[in-house]
Amino acid sequence: MSEQVNRLTRDLDLRTTLDMVTLMHTEDRRAVAAVRPTLPVIAQVVDAIADRMRRGGRLIYVGSGTSGRLGILDAAECPPTFNAPPDQVIGVIAGGHTALTRGVEGAEDDADGGRQALADLNVREQDSVVCIAASGRTPYVIGAAEEARRRGALTVALVCNLPAPLARHADYVLAPLVGPEVIAGSTPLKSWP
């Protein structure tokens, strides 16, 4: 769904700047509204993660591109904001630290890389792994979800499209269906505003 062309923004480049930003704001509001139906599942996920963290588990975010960067950003905010130990919330991105500031070509297509990243973290049963992929079909993230599940960790798929292959590898699926992106293929503009 988020991968489709947005018919409302096909002519975005021909609009005035005010029209562009107004339309983007309208689409952002739709994205926020799409979260509301997922609130019951979000509450279940929060409770499940909290239970595992009380038993010494970690929260691990996995993504590629913007999805990975947002997971790392959230993980980095947990120690100063919540006084969490630095190794309690971890962000993993396809392509490693280089991918934080520039694209690493092909990293998102490496399912074995996703599996290896979770093996390197020695993911355990008490850990929770949130796999983030707007399309729901990123091989790196699916590989990580498969490995997390194999190790008995709680798995959560955060996607903006259904059906999504990633959902088959998750205990919980969070799917705010935001609709087509403002600019096709640009998840930072709507899926992850």
Image: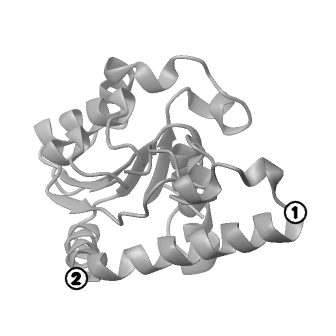
Residue contact between numbered discs 1 and 2, judged by CB atoms under 8 Å? no
Q: Is residue 61 left or right of residue 193?
A: left
Residue 128 seen by the camera = no
Q: Which amino acid type is shown beneath numbered disc 2? A: Pro
Image mark for residue 49: none
- Residue at screen point 38% across, 52% down: 60
Image position, residue 45 (x, y; %): 24, 71
Q: SS of the residue at dot 1?
A: loop
Q: In this view, does 154 lie to the left or right of 17?
A: left
Q: Residues within 10 Å of mark 1 (few under 14, many from 20)?
A: few
Residue wearing tag 1: 16
- Residue at screen point 24% across, 44% down: 164
Q: Is residue 154 above or below residue 109?
A: below
Disc 1/disc 2 C-alpha distance (Å): 40 Å
- Residue at screen point 54% across, 79% down: 82
Q: SS of the residue at dot 2?
A: helix
Residue wearing tag 2: 40
